[in-house]
Each structure stands twice: as structure tokens, then as C-alpha cells.
Image (tube, rainbow, N blue to C red):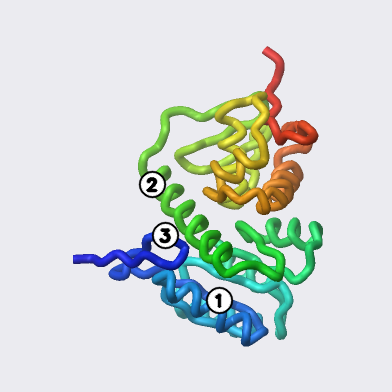
Amino acid sequence: MEQTHIGPSGAAASVGAQRRVLVVEDDRTITDAIAARLRAEGFQVRTAGDGPAAVDTAEAWQPDLLVLDVMLPGFDGLEVCRRVQAQRPVPVLMLTARDDETDMLVGLGVGADDYMTKPFSMRELAARVHVLLRRVERATLAAHTPRSGILRLGELEIDHAQRRVRVRGGDVHLTPTEFDLLVCLANTPRAVLSREQLLAEVWDWADASGTRTVDSHIKALRRKIGAERIRTVHGVGYALETPAA
């Protein structure tokens, strides 16, 4: 019988089918702390301290998720993300030492799903890892239980079954997080959703400290589907614009 482990964050993990997390970080103290916390949460963990080792380990071990630092010896985390994603899609939680929005947007652009700025709490990191893995499970379930039809909002098309988005008939590549964010906005077009609502719906994260994550993902999404399609309501949140009836 498969056992269930309740980690310190309160999230359940199946011991009989442990998820694999590869931690890529060149600071040994940080690496050991992250690895210890994730093992306490019930994950199998391996570590790598530079870019080439990270890519090699990811190819050989096939992790379910990467916790990936941006600044690494050999080549940086952005290049690691590109190479790993070229092998197979895998959720990536990127760590950055700088609260620099450009770095965050570049990271999202090469396939990262979420980011955290150092210093961060181990509790929040563990919670983010659980959230990203749950999102992958939901996406897999959705792919096997297709919804009828394609949602069309003017020149924007959202195919739930295939998790594909098209603008003016051309495919737009979105990360899993960007797709879920777009669907959340599209479920109530023109309605304004607060950052806190989006954070809770898309990330399953109720801490208001994560609203910067929402803003950065919105900016990345705008670059891909067109800035005019997402309206900012200052001090409130965002709405997906649709053509006038």
C-alpha cells in the first residue's frame, strides 16, 4: 500500500512514487539547505553545481522539476534552461540574486515557470515546488479529458485540449504557467481580476508577497499575445480585452 508523507509545509507527497527534483546552485550552503528541505517534503533530490553538470544530470536522471540558479559556472542558468527544455519539457523554478525584472522576463522567456529572488524562505520555496508539480498534473489530466470546442476571442484562440494558443492563426508558444494565466483571464473576459485572485487561482499561493510574480508573467504574456489584449487596472489587477460585440 502506498504511503503518504506529510511534509513540514503541510503538503502531502506519495512516498511510493516520489517526485525527483534537481537543485542547481553553486553555493554549497544554499544547495544543502534546499536539498534538506525538499527531502523532508518527501522528494528525491540530486544536486549540481555548474551548468554542464546540470544538463548532464537532467538528461541522465530525468527529474520532474528543476530548482535552478541563474548565476552558475560553466554556463548560466538561462542556458541550462534552454538545453534542458530542448531535451524534454520540465517545470523550472528559477532563483535569482537580483530583483531585476529584465532577468525575470528573460528567464520566463526561455522556459522557466516561476522565479524567486534571494533571499527567500525555505517554506515558500517548498510550497512553490508543490504548486508547480500540481500544475503539471492538472495539465496532464486536462490533456486526457478534452473540453469541447476552442475558445475564440477575436483573433485569439485557446485550445484547452491541446493547450495551444493561436493569434491571427499563428501558434504562440506559452509556458504552462502563461497558458494557465491566460485561461484564468479568459474564463471571465473583460472582468478585472486582482493580483491576489490570479495568484490564488494560477499559483495556489495566497501570500500577497508573490504579486510581483503575477506582474512579470503578465508582461511576458503581453509580449507573446499582444500588449493591447491585457488591460491593467491600476491598483486592482488585470482584465483580458475582447472585441466589441
Image-based side of 1 in relation to 40, left or right: left
Q: Please name the amino acid that badge 2 sits on.
A: Leu
Residue 59 in the image: state x and y as whole percent.
50, 76
Mark 1 → mark 2, Cα distance in angstroms: 29 Å
Of marks 1 and 2, which one's residue comes earlier in the chain?
Answer: 1
* Quadrant into which the C terminus falls: top right
Residue 5 in the image: state x and y as whole percent.
33, 67
- Of circles 1 and 2, the one toward us is 1
The crowding category of the residue bearing disc 3, from other C-alpha atoms within 10 Å (few below 14, some 14 to 19, many at least 20), is some
Of marks 1 and 3, which one's residue comes earlier in the chain?
Answer: 3
Badge 1 marks a residue whose secondary structure is: helix
Residue 12 in the image: state x and y as whole percent.
37, 60
Image-based side of 127 in relation to 244, left or right: left
Q: Residue at 60% x, 45% y: name it.
A: 199
User: Total marks drawn?
Assistant: 3
The crowding category of the residue bearing disc 1, from other C-alpha atoms within 10 Å (few below 14, some 14 to 19, many at least 20), is many
- Of circles 2 and 3, the one toward us is 3
Residue where numbered disc 2 is placed: 141
The image quarter in which residue 235 lies: top right
Q: Are marks 1 and 2 in contact (CB under 8 Å)?
A: no
Q: Residue at 68% x, 32% y: name it.
A: 168
Q: Residue at 76% x, 45% y: name it.
A: 223
Badge 3 marks a residue whose secondary structure is: loop
Mark 1 → mark 3, Cα distance in angstroms: 16 Å
Q: Residue at 63% x, 60% y: name it.
A: 112
Of marks 2 and 3, which one's residue comes earlier in the chain?
Answer: 3
Residue where numbered disc 3 is placed: 11
Q: Which of 201 and 177 is in front in this view?
A: 201
Badge 2 marks a residue whose secondary structure is: helix
